[in-house]
């Protein structure tokens, strides 16, 4: 399917992790493990590492840009992110990680989003099922 | 309509490797989406240095995300990126320092990871402390003022109504928009300094008149006496954030008892449980003289009642306590001068039996000390923390028991950040509990 908007262009594939609630990367995720540590989040304990992360939008701290960039740097970040509305805090984190380390975490906005568990690929403006 | 940025135009391999590639030889197609002034183009061409060029490139990319047609000038900035979260933040700041970056507008700095006035409080890893200090030094080198506070709205020269600014730090953003009537979007780390270095922001969202209109409504329907209790306000904020997400809520039913400090607590909680960057309180905040003006004469998309029951639920959600009281932490966001005056009256002649932390800025601490307000507070036995906050850096050490706080934001983040259990109460509850050594509830919520 075609996405509504490409915020950070790139290609990434991975198992889909569809979050049931918004997430603040700062204070909500462990940089070291990539796991959700916000105890109030319904998917607390689940790892974002290497996933195609589907979530409604960001939440909370403006430090989430730094946290996302650092996770991308050390390899615990999501492979790509599918949002249902633009979130510039995530976008700037991904852009800076790309510029500094050459690791691209594509971010797109899509109205129809893939379900958790399946493997999908973000490919520029296309969102494709792999499995 | 689909709008998208082809970042391959901006982030060529040289740029990725060095961080300092030029855009001059590249197609200008993407420049059409965000219209640039002559000065913008000059910055983009690197005529004012590499740091300014990088900042402008990133600004334009984010402007696309926000759907901006052009950029506008700002009068001030507040930087959240000075708090240490790993090497990426340091590498980015280093790149800007190496590129001879210098902020274009007066720029304040948020809390960092160290208390430079009380360095002995730090109980963490020394290598991390060194990196955190290096990050702080980078931002000062870029020309930012070492204010080290998450409450820049408590500084003497805060922004005024209608000013366009670029602020990071979620609680500061919501306060600036809602209470001061200054105009900022929700800027994340990195973006904040890009705005400060260029003196520009994408004209979108809360910078525009229409972006500031409320779209959902909350009616406070509680007995009037509830509005006298400090604890009511972070509870309202928590619910507001959960329901509003990133929309602009309009609150009815508040009155002059919603002081700046109470609105601070409300906004900070709403920006933690949600992505609230602005709210209106009808008859209280400057852009909401009436409900219809706050909503722009349009019907709200959603109406929610804030009742005693919903606020009680919020209190339960923010309390993870297991039993004994181990410590108290107040001042998140940083304690104001007025709150110090209240605290001084509450602690007069008393003594805490547990570690009692107060987070504040060096500026407010200085004012409180000069006014003689600190004398009873010091005698009570508090540990004053400046420049940082107890929930973002290892200061409290191993706590035996729960931590009590008056902050919805602290209660939201501390369980994950510090692994502690939390009790939420008013400032008066916190003092009473510290004296008796067990969590007590004193006010309307007891």
Image (tube, rainbow, N blue to C red):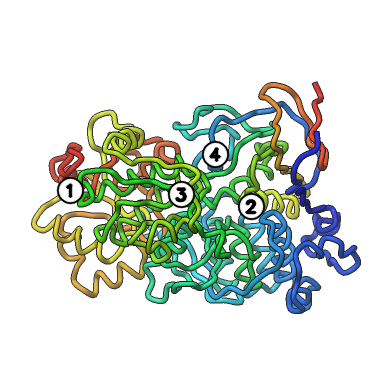
Q: Which residue is mark 4?
A: A23
Secondary structure state at the residue bearing disc 2:
helix
Instruction: Give x and y (percent) for residue A97.
Output: 70, 50
Res B116 visible: no
State the quadrant of the N terminus of chain A. top right
Q: In the depicted view, which residue is nearer to us: B55 or B244? A: B244
Q: Residue at x 66, y 53 (%)?
A: A92
Chain letter for mark 3, please: B
Asked if marks 3 and 2 touch (Cβ < 8 Å), the reply is no
Q: How many numbered discs? A: 4
Q: Please say if A94 is above or below A33.
A: below
Question: How far is disc 3 from disc 1 in space, using C-alphas?
Answer: 26 Å
Chain letter for mark 1, please: B
Chain letter for mark 2, please: A
Question: How far is disc 2 from disc 1 in space, using C-alphas?
Answer: 41 Å
Q: Give the crowd class for mark 1: few <14, some 14-19, many >=20 residues within 10 Å.
A: few
Question: How far is disc 4 from disc 1 in space, using C-alphas?
Answer: 35 Å
Instruction: Give x and y (percent) for residue B78.
Output: 51, 66
Instruction: Let me know if marks 2 and 4 both belong to one chain.
Output: yes
Tag shown at residue B225: 1
Question: How far is disc 2 from disc 4 in space, using C-alphas?
Answer: 14 Å
Q: Which residue is mark 3?
A: B271
Instruction: Let me know if marks 4 and 1 both belong to one chain.
Output: no
Q: In the depicted view, which residue is nearer to us: B145 or B3? A: B3
Q: Residue at x 57, y 27 (%)?
A: A46
Q: In the depicted view, which residue is nearer to us: B187 or B49? A: B187
Q: Residue at x 24, y 62 (%)?
A: B340
Question: Mark 3 or 1, which is nearer the eye?
Answer: 1
Instruction: Give x and y (percent) for residue B277.
Output: 49, 54
Of label 2 and label 4, which has the lower sequence position? 4
Q: Which residue is mark 2?
A: A88
Question: How far is disc 3 from disc 2 in space, using C-alphas?
Answer: 16 Å
């Amino acid at each position: 399917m075609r996405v509504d908007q490409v915020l950070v262009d790139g290609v990434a594939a991975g198992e889909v992790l569809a979050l049931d609630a918004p997430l603040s990367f700062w204070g909500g995720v462990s940089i070291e493990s990539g796991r959700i540590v916000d105890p109030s989040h319904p998917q607390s304990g689940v790892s974002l590492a290497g996933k195609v992360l589907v979530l409604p939008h960001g939440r909370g701290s403006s430090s989430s840009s730094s946290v996302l960039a650092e996770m991308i740097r050390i390899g615990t970040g999501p492979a790509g992110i599918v949002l249902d509305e633009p979130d510039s805090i995530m976008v700037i984190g991904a852009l800076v990680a790309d510029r500094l380390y050459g690791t691209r975490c594509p971010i797109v906005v899509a109205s129809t989003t893939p379900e958790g568990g399946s493997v999908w690929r973000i490919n520029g403006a296309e969102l494709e099922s792999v499995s | 309509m689909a709008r998208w940025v082809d970042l391959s135009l901006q982030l060529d391999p040289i740029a990725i490797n060095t961080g300092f590639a030029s855009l001059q030889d590249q197609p200008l197609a993407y420049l059409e989406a965000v219209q640039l002034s002559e000065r913008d183009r000059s910055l983009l061409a690197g005529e004012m240095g590499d740091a300014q060029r990088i900042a402008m490139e990133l600004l334009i990319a984010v402007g696309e995300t926000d759907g901006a047609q052009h950029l506008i000038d700002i009068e001030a900035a507040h930087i959240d990126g000075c708090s240490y979260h790993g090497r990426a933040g340091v590498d980015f700041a280093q790149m800007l320092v190496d590129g001879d970056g210098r902020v274009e507008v007066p720029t304040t700095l948020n809390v960092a990871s160290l208390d430079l006035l009380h360095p002995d409080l730090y109980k963490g890893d020394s290598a991390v402390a060194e990196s955190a200090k290096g990050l702080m030094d980078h931002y000062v080198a870029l020309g930012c003022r070492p204010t080290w506070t998450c409450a820049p709205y408590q500084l003497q020269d805060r922004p005024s109504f209608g000013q366009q600014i670029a602020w990071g730090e979620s609680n500061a953003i919501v306060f600036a928009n809602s209470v001061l009537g200054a105009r900022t979007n929700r800027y994340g780390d990195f973006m904040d300094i890009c705005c400060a270095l260029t003196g520009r922001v994408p004209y979108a969202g809360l910078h525009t008149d229409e972006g500031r209109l409320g779209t959902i409504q909350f009616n406070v329907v509680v007995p009037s006496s509830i509005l006298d209790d400090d604890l009511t306000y972070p509870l309202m904020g928590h619910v507001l954030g959960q329901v509003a997400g990133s929309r602009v809520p309009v609150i009815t039913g508040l009155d002059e008892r919603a002081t700046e400090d109470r609105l601070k607590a409300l906004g900070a909680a709403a920006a933690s449980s949600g992505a609230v960057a602005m709210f209106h309180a009808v008859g209280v905040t400057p852009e909401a003289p009436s409900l219809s003006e706050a909503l722009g004469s349009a019907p709200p998309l959603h109406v929610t009642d804030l009742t005693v029951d919903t606020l009680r639920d919020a209190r339960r959600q923010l309390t993870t306590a297991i039993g004994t009281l181990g410590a108290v932490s107040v001042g998140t966001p940083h304690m104001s001068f007025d709150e110090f005056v209240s605290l001084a009256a509450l602690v007069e002649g008393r003594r805490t039996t547990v570690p009692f932390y107060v987070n504040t800025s060096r500026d407010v601490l200085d004012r409180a000390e000069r006014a003689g307000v600190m004398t009873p507070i010091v005698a009570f036995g508090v540990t004053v923390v400046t420049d940082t906050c107890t929930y973002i850096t290892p200061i409290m050490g191993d706590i035996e028991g729960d931590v009590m706080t008056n902050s919805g934001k602290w209660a939201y983040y501390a369980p994950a950040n510090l692994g502690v259990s939390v009790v939420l109460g008013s400032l008066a509850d916190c003092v009473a509990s510290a004296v008796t050594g067990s969590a007590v509830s004193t006010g309307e919520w007891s």
